[in-house]
Amino acid sequence: MKQGMLWYDDAPGRSLEDKIARAVAYYQHKYGDRPNVCYVHPSSLPAGFEHREGIKILTATDVLPHHFWIGIASAAETAH
Protein backbone atom coordinates (compact mmCIF):
# COMPACT_ATOMS: atom_id res chain seq x y z
CA MET A 1 0.00 0.00 0.00
CA LYS A 2 1.46 3.36 -1.02
CA GLN A 3 -0.51 5.36 1.54
CA GLY A 4 -2.81 4.10 4.26
CA MET A 5 -4.81 4.93 7.35
CA LEU A 6 -6.06 2.83 10.24
CA TRP A 7 -9.73 3.43 11.10
CA TYR A 8 -11.58 2.10 14.14
CA ASP A 9 -15.35 1.66 14.28
CA ASP A 10 -17.06 -0.69 16.73
CA ALA A 11 -20.56 0.82 16.52
CA PRO A 12 -22.89 -2.19 16.99
CA GLY A 13 -25.78 -0.79 14.93
CA ARG A 14 -23.67 0.19 11.93
CA SER A 15 -23.28 -2.20 8.99
CA LEU A 16 -19.87 -3.17 7.63
CA GLU A 17 -20.71 -1.35 4.41
CA ASP A 18 -21.52 1.86 6.33
CA LYS A 19 -18.34 1.58 8.41
CA ILE A 20 -16.24 1.27 5.26
CA ALA A 21 -18.10 4.16 3.59
CA ARG A 22 -17.40 6.39 6.61
CA ALA A 23 -13.72 5.45 6.55
CA VAL A 24 -13.54 6.14 2.80
CA ALA A 25 -15.17 9.56 3.21
CA TYR A 26 -12.78 10.53 6.02
CA TYR A 27 -9.74 9.28 4.09
CA GLN A 28 -10.79 11.16 0.97
CA HIS A 29 -11.38 14.37 2.95
CA LYS A 30 -8.08 14.11 4.85
CA TYR A 31 -5.76 13.02 2.03
CA GLY A 32 -7.57 14.29 -1.08
CA ASP A 33 -7.44 10.89 -2.80
CA ARG A 34 -9.98 8.10 -2.98
CA PRO A 35 -8.73 4.82 -1.50
CA ASN A 36 -9.02 1.62 -3.49
CA VAL A 37 -8.37 -1.06 -0.87
CA CYS A 38 -9.54 -1.86 2.66
CA TYR A 39 -8.13 -4.64 4.84
CA VAL A 40 -10.31 -6.07 7.61
CA HIS A 41 -9.97 -8.94 10.08
CA PRO A 42 -11.25 -12.22 8.52
CA SER A 43 -13.97 -12.54 11.19
CA SER A 44 -15.40 -9.17 10.11
CA LEU A 45 -16.00 -10.08 6.49
CA PRO A 46 -19.20 -11.90 5.50
CA ALA A 47 -19.07 -14.31 2.56
CA GLY A 48 -19.35 -12.61 -0.83
CA PHE A 49 -18.34 -9.16 0.44
CA GLU A 50 -15.47 -8.24 -1.92
CA HIS A 51 -15.99 -4.85 -3.52
CA ARG A 52 -17.83 -1.75 -2.45
CA GLU A 53 -17.94 1.35 -4.65
CA GLY A 54 -14.54 0.68 -6.21
CA ILE A 55 -12.93 -0.42 -2.93
CA LYS A 56 -11.41 -3.92 -2.90
CA ILE A 57 -12.09 -5.53 0.49
CA LEU A 58 -9.38 -7.96 1.62
CA THR A 59 -8.70 -9.80 4.85
CA ALA A 60 -5.57 -9.66 6.97
CA THR A 61 -5.09 -11.46 10.28
CA ASP A 62 -2.87 -8.65 11.57
CA VAL A 63 -5.78 -6.19 11.37
CA LEU A 64 -7.76 -6.36 14.61
CA PRO A 65 -11.56 -6.74 14.65
CA HIS A 66 -13.38 -3.40 14.26
CA HIS A 67 -10.30 -1.90 12.57
CA PHE A 68 -10.04 -0.95 8.92
CA TRP A 69 -6.69 -0.48 7.19
CA ILE A 70 -7.67 1.64 4.22
CA GLY A 71 -5.59 3.24 1.51
CA ILE A 72 -4.21 3.18 -1.99
CA ALA A 73 -2.68 0.00 -3.34
CA SER A 74 -1.25 -0.87 -6.74
CA ALA A 75 -3.26 -2.98 -9.16
CA ALA A 76 -0.94 -5.93 -8.43
CA GLU A 77 -1.69 -5.73 -4.70
CA THR A 78 -5.45 -5.76 -5.20
CA ALA A 79 -5.43 -8.49 -7.87
CA HIS A 80 -5.53 -11.40 -5.38
Image: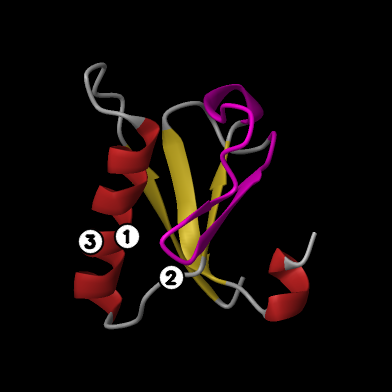
Closer to the N terminus: mark 2 or mark 1? 1
Using the image, determine if residue 32 lies above or below residue 43: below
Q: Residue at horizontal 29%, vertical 78%?
A: 31
Instruction: Locate residue 48: give its quadrant.
Output: top right
Magenta region: 42-61
Dot 2: what SS?
loop
Q: Amino acid at mark 1?
A: Val
Give the amino acid type for the residue marked by disc 3 in the picture: Tyr
What residue lies at 24% left-to-right and 27% top-to-bottom?
14
**SS at mark 1 in the image:** helix
Question: Residue 61 appears in which quarter of the rendering?
Answer: top right
Whole-number angstrom distance, CA of label 2 to CA of label 3: 10 Å
> What is the x, y in percent for residue 4?
48, 66
- Residue 52's tag is none
The answer to whether the residue labelled 2 contacts the one labelled 1, judged by CB atoms less than 8 Å apart, is: yes
Marks 1/3: CA distance? 5 Å
Q: Which residue is mark 3?
A: 26
Q: Report which residue position mark 1 lands on.
A: 24
Density class for disc 1 (Cα within 10 Å; few <14, some 14-19, many ≥20) is many
Q: Earlier in the sequence, mark 2 or mark 3?
A: 3
Residue contact at pointers 1 and 3, CB within 8 angstroms: yes
Q: Is residue 26 magenta?
A: no
Query: In what element is the residue under mark 3?
Result: helix
Q: Amino acid at mark 2?
A: Pro
Position of the N terminus by quadrant:
bottom right
Q: Is 50 one of the magenta-colored residues?
A: yes
Q: Which mark is residue 35?
A: 2
